[in-house]
Image (cartoon, rainbow, N blue to C red):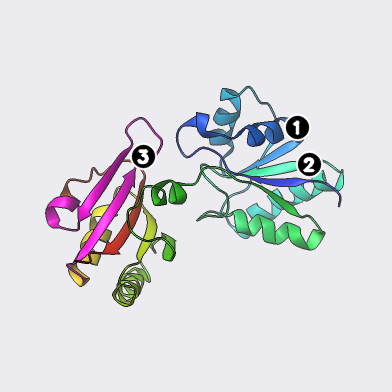
Amino acid sequence: MASNFYIIATPIGNRDDITTRAMQVLGDINFIVAEDTRHTGELLAYFGIKKPLISFRDAPVPVMNRALKQIKGRLRKNESGAYVTDAGTPGVSDPGWRLISALLPLGVIPIPIPGPSAVTALLSVIDVPLDEYRFIGFLPKKKGYQTKINELNLYLRHKERRGIILYESPKRVHKTLTDMMKLNPKLGAIIGRELTKKFETIYRGKLTDKFIANLPEKGEYVVFIHNLVA
């Protein structure tokens, strides 16, 4: 297949963060694969772009296979396409890797169009060394949650001047931070809420009951946890 297939980063909140290159590619290609076609449709409408949309998300295998059949059919017609997720850079805690792994055996070489990412947005305003850190994505919801919390605590104890970064929902952010604090009372946090959006807030401080209680239980969170070193 000689078709081009792009992996495009889209805004994490503020739509004007989209890159000029991303806009150009979205306007030139034949079709778009989206994690959520309604969400992507709103983004495209904002910029006046109209393209056929194919849904590809974490779903039962038969559902994903039907989507793949559509995508492969278009690529075999020498059409060019792109994949976008709900927000940020595809492949980071979303099903992008599944699509790429299915297309590589066909000879399709994905072309990255870099841009917004909630992880790098928060990392850019962190005041501790970042030559090494650990990215987790979302923690397990139930099974494996405590095991992962224990594992992260061990990592921080062995990496004195390093940190971990993860995504968390507003409903679980209090529990996650409290559980980490109970294992190690000398942790600090830098937390981004609703990054790039109207009510963007960045919280900094030692993990305490008061600090955690002040975090609103709404909005999207990116959390960086690190050791407090005197």
Callout 1, which amino acid? Asp
Callout 3, which amino acid? Glu
Horizontal and vertical percent position of residue 215: 22, 46
The residue lying at 66 percent from left, 26 percent from top is 49
Q: Is residue 194 magenta?
A: yes
Give the magenta part as a residue range.
Answer: 184-212
The residue lying at 78 percent from left, 55 percent from top is 108
Q: Is residue 210 above or below residue 23?
A: below
Neighbour tally class for label 2: few under 14, some 14-19, many 20 plus, Cα within 10 Å: many
Neighbour tally class for label 3: few under 14, some 14-19, many 20 plus, Cα within 10 Å: some
Q: CA distance from mark 1 to mark 3?
A: 31 Å
Q: CA distance from mark 2 to mark 3?
A: 33 Å
**Residue of label 1:** 28
Mark 1 falls on what kind of element?
Answer: helix
Q: Which mark is residue 70?
A: none
**Residue of label 2:** 80
Q: Is residue 93 above or below residue 117?
A: below
